[in-house]
Protein backbone atom coordinates (compact mmCIF):
# COMPACT_ATOMS: atom_id res chain seq x y z
CA UNK A 1 0.00 0.00 0.00
CA UNK A 2 2.75 2.46 0.96
CA UNK A 3 4.74 1.49 -2.14
CA UNK A 4 1.76 2.31 -4.41
CA UNK A 5 1.34 5.68 -2.67
CA UNK A 6 5.04 6.54 -3.09
CA UNK A 7 4.98 5.39 -6.71
CA UNK A 8 1.96 7.64 -7.46
CA UNK A 9 3.73 10.63 -5.88
CA UNK A 10 6.87 9.95 -7.92
CA UNK A 11 4.90 9.62 -11.16
CA UNK A 12 3.02 12.84 -10.39
CA UNK A 13 6.26 14.70 -9.64
CA UNK A 14 7.90 13.46 -12.85
CA UNK A 15 4.81 14.50 -14.84
CA UNK A 16 4.81 17.98 -13.28
CA UNK A 17 8.53 18.38 -13.93
CA UNK A 18 8.18 17.39 -17.58
CA UNK A 19 5.23 19.73 -18.03
CA UNK A 20 7.20 22.62 -16.53
CA UNK A 21 10.13 21.93 -18.85
CA UNK A 22 7.89 21.98 -21.91
CA UNK A 23 6.23 25.28 -21.05
CA UNK A 24 7.45 27.86 -23.49
CA UNK A 25 8.64 31.21 -22.29
CA UNK A 26 6.54 34.14 -23.48
CA UNK A 27 7.82 36.00 -26.55
CA UNK A 28 9.15 39.41 -25.60
CA UNK A 29 8.55 42.19 -28.11
CA UNK A 30 11.24 44.80 -28.57
CA UNK A 31 10.88 48.42 -29.56
CA UNK A 32 12.02 49.43 -33.02
CA UNK A 33 15.65 50.42 -32.79
CA UNK A 34 15.81 53.98 -34.03
CA UNK A 35 18.38 56.75 -34.25
CA UNK A 36 16.05 59.64 -35.04
CA UNK A 37 16.96 61.28 -31.74
CA UNK A 38 20.43 61.98 -33.19
CA UNK A 39 21.02 64.98 -35.46
CA UNK A 40 20.86 64.22 -39.17
CA UNK A 41 23.99 64.15 -41.32
CA UNK A 42 23.08 66.49 -44.20
CA UNK A 43 25.07 65.77 -47.33
CA UNK A 44 25.42 67.67 -50.63
CA UNK A 45 24.23 64.67 -52.62
CA UNK A 46 21.23 63.90 -54.77
CA UNK A 47 20.89 60.26 -53.71
CA UNK A 48 21.90 57.85 -50.94
CA UNK A 49 22.55 54.19 -51.73
CA UNK A 50 22.68 51.47 -49.06
CA UNK A 51 24.63 48.34 -49.96
CA UNK A 52 25.32 45.22 -47.87
CA UNK A 53 28.49 43.71 -49.29
CA UNK A 54 29.51 40.89 -46.99
CA UNK A 55 28.99 37.16 -46.76
CA UNK A 56 26.19 36.23 -44.35
CA UNK A 57 26.64 33.02 -42.41
CA UNK A 58 24.06 31.17 -40.31
CA UNK A 59 26.39 28.35 -39.24
CA UNK A 60 27.83 28.28 -35.73
CA UNK A 61 29.43 30.28 -34.25
CA UNK A 62 27.50 32.94 -36.25
CA UNK A 63 24.23 33.80 -34.48
CA UNK A 64 23.12 37.20 -35.84
CA UNK A 65 19.99 35.57 -37.31
CA UNK A 66 18.85 34.68 -33.76
CA UNK A 67 19.02 38.27 -32.49
CA UNK A 68 15.84 40.41 -32.22
CA UNK A 69 17.62 42.84 -34.56
CA UNK A 70 20.80 41.87 -36.35
CA UNK A 71 23.82 44.17 -36.54
CA UNK A 72 23.18 44.55 -40.29
CA UNK A 73 19.55 45.65 -39.87
CA UNK A 74 20.52 48.03 -37.05
CA UNK A 75 23.19 49.60 -39.24
CA UNK A 76 20.73 50.02 -42.12
CA UNK A 77 18.31 51.68 -39.67
CA UNK A 78 21.12 53.98 -38.50
CA UNK A 79 21.83 55.09 -42.08
CA UNK A 80 18.12 55.56 -42.84
CA UNK A 81 17.60 57.70 -39.74
CA UNK A 82 20.79 59.75 -39.86
CA UNK A 83 21.91 60.42 -43.45
CA UNK A 84 19.99 62.93 -45.60
CA UNK A 85 20.47 63.92 -49.24
CA UNK A 86 19.93 67.66 -49.68
CA UNK A 87 20.78 68.14 -53.34
CA UNK A 88 23.77 68.38 -55.63
CA UNK A 89 25.31 66.26 -58.38
CA UNK A 90 26.98 63.62 -56.24
CA UNK A 91 25.74 60.34 -54.77
CA UNK A 92 26.49 58.97 -51.31
CA UNK A 93 26.92 55.23 -50.97
CA UNK A 94 27.11 53.47 -47.60
CA UNK A 95 28.53 49.97 -48.01
CA UNK A 96 28.33 47.53 -45.11
CA UNK A 97 31.40 45.32 -45.31
CA UNK A 98 30.98 43.49 -41.99
CA UNK A 99 28.00 42.89 -39.69
CA UNK A 100 28.26 39.80 -37.56
CA UNK A 101 27.47 38.26 -34.20
CA UNK A 102 29.24 35.18 -32.88
CA UNK A 103 28.65 32.90 -29.92
CA UNK A 104 31.83 31.57 -28.33
CA UNK A 105 31.48 28.78 -25.78
CA UNK A 106 33.51 29.43 -22.63
CA UNK A 107 35.34 26.80 -20.62
CA UNK A 108 33.31 25.70 -17.61
CA UNK A 109 34.56 24.39 -14.29
CA UNK A 110 33.64 20.68 -14.48
CA UNK A 111 34.90 19.92 -10.97
CA UNK A 112 32.57 19.18 -8.10
CA UNK A 113 32.63 22.84 -6.99
CA UNK A 114 31.60 23.94 -10.50
CA UNK A 115 28.20 22.33 -9.98
CA UNK A 116 27.39 24.99 -7.40
CA UNK A 117 28.47 27.97 -9.53
CA UNK A 118 26.44 29.95 -12.03
CA UNK A 119 29.28 30.15 -14.53
CA UNK A 120 29.74 32.41 -17.53
CA UNK A 121 29.09 29.96 -20.36
CA UNK A 122 28.96 32.06 -23.54
CA UNK A 123 30.60 35.14 -24.98
CA UNK A 124 28.73 37.08 -27.67
CA UNK A 125 30.92 39.18 -29.95
CA UNK A 126 29.34 41.63 -32.39
CA UNK A 127 31.06 43.79 -34.97
CA UNK A 128 30.22 46.10 -37.83
CA UNK A 129 32.26 47.89 -40.45
CA UNK A 130 31.07 50.24 -43.19
CA UNK A 131 32.35 52.83 -45.60
CA UNK A 132 30.65 55.98 -46.80
CA UNK A 133 31.67 57.12 -50.27
CA UNK A 134 30.87 60.27 -52.22
CA UNK A 135 30.62 59.50 -55.93
CA UNK A 136 30.40 61.99 -58.80
CA UNK A 137 27.79 61.78 -61.56
CA UNK A 138 30.05 59.31 -63.46
CA UNK A 139 30.41 56.98 -60.45
CA UNK A 140 33.98 58.04 -59.67
CA UNK A 141 34.90 58.19 -56.00
CA UNK A 142 35.56 61.71 -54.71
CA UNK A 143 35.81 60.95 -50.98
CA UNK A 144 35.55 58.04 -48.58
CA UNK A 145 35.38 57.47 -44.83
CA UNK A 146 35.20 54.19 -42.92
CA UNK A 147 34.17 53.25 -39.42
CA UNK A 148 34.00 50.05 -37.43
CA UNK A 149 32.96 48.95 -33.97
CA UNK A 150 33.03 45.85 -31.80
CA UNK A 151 31.05 45.06 -28.66
CA UNK A 152 30.94 41.88 -26.58
CA UNK A 153 29.39 40.47 -23.44
CA UNK A 154 29.47 37.22 -21.47
CA UNK A 155 26.33 35.43 -20.31
CA UNK A 156 25.79 33.03 -17.42
CA UNK A 157 24.75 29.48 -18.15
CA UNK A 158 21.45 29.92 -16.27
CA UNK A 159 20.33 32.86 -18.44
CA UNK A 160 16.98 32.10 -20.08
CA UNK A 161 16.38 32.56 -23.81
CA UNK A 162 14.06 35.51 -23.11
CA UNK A 163 16.79 37.21 -21.06
CA UNK A 164 19.40 36.41 -23.70
CA UNK A 165 17.24 38.09 -26.34
CA UNK A 166 17.13 41.26 -24.18
CA UNK A 167 20.92 41.07 -23.77
CA UNK A 168 21.38 40.65 -27.54
CA UNK A 169 19.14 43.64 -28.27
CA UNK A 170 21.09 45.85 -25.84
CA UNK A 171 24.39 44.53 -27.19
CA UNK A 172 23.52 45.57 -30.75
CA UNK A 173 22.28 48.96 -29.56
CA UNK A 174 25.65 49.58 -27.81
CA UNK A 175 27.49 48.35 -30.91
CA UNK A 176 25.75 50.84 -33.20
CA UNK A 177 26.26 53.64 -30.66
CA UNK A 178 30.01 52.97 -30.87
CA UNK A 179 29.86 52.83 -34.66
CA UNK A 180 27.91 56.10 -34.73
CA UNK A 181 30.57 57.95 -32.72
CA UNK A 182 33.37 56.68 -34.96
CA UNK A 183 31.56 57.42 -38.24
CA UNK A 184 30.43 60.87 -37.08
CA UNK A 185 34.00 61.80 -36.14
CA UNK A 186 35.35 60.58 -39.49
CA UNK A 187 32.66 62.41 -41.47
CA UNK A 188 33.32 65.66 -39.57
CA UNK A 189 37.07 65.33 -40.22
CA UNK A 190 37.09 64.17 -43.84
CA UNK A 191 33.82 65.10 -45.56
CA UNK A 192 33.48 68.77 -44.54
CA UNK A 193 33.12 69.89 -48.16
CA UNK A 194 30.09 67.64 -48.64
CA UNK A 195 28.32 68.58 -45.39
CA UNK A 196 25.53 71.16 -45.15
Image (tube, rainbow, N blue to C red):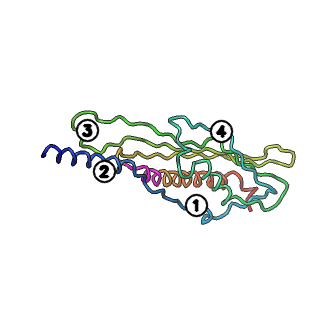
- The mark lying in front, picked from 1 and 2, is 2
Pointer 1 or 2: first along the chain:
2
Distance from label 2 to label 4 (Cα)? 48 Å
Q: Nearer the viewer, mark 2 or mark 3?
A: 2
Q: Which residue is mark 4?
A: 54
Q: CA distance from mark 4 to mark 1?
A: 24 Å
Among the two numbered marks 1 and 3 on one chain, the one whose residue lies closer to the N terminus: 1
- Residue matched to label 3: 114
Mark carried by residue 32: 1
Q: Is residue 88 left or right of residue 191?
A: right
Q: Residues within 10 Å of mark 4 (few under 14, many from 20)?
A: some
Which is more toward the observer, 93 or 188?
A: 93
Does 7 sit above or below residue 169?
above
- Marks 1/3: CA distance? 39 Å
Q: Are marks 2 and 4 in contact (CB under 8 Å)?
A: no
Label 1: which secondary element: loop
Upstream in the sequence, badge 2 or badge 3? 2
Which segment did they paint magenta?
Answer: 159-167
Residue pointed to by mark 2: 16
* Sooner in the amino-acid sequence: mark 4 or mark 1: 1
Amino acid sequence: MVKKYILRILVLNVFMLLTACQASSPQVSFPTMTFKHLPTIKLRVVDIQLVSNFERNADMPHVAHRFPISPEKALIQWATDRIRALGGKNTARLTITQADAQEIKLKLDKNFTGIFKNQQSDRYITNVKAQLEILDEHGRRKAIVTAQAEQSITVAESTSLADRRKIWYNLVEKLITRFNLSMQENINSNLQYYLL
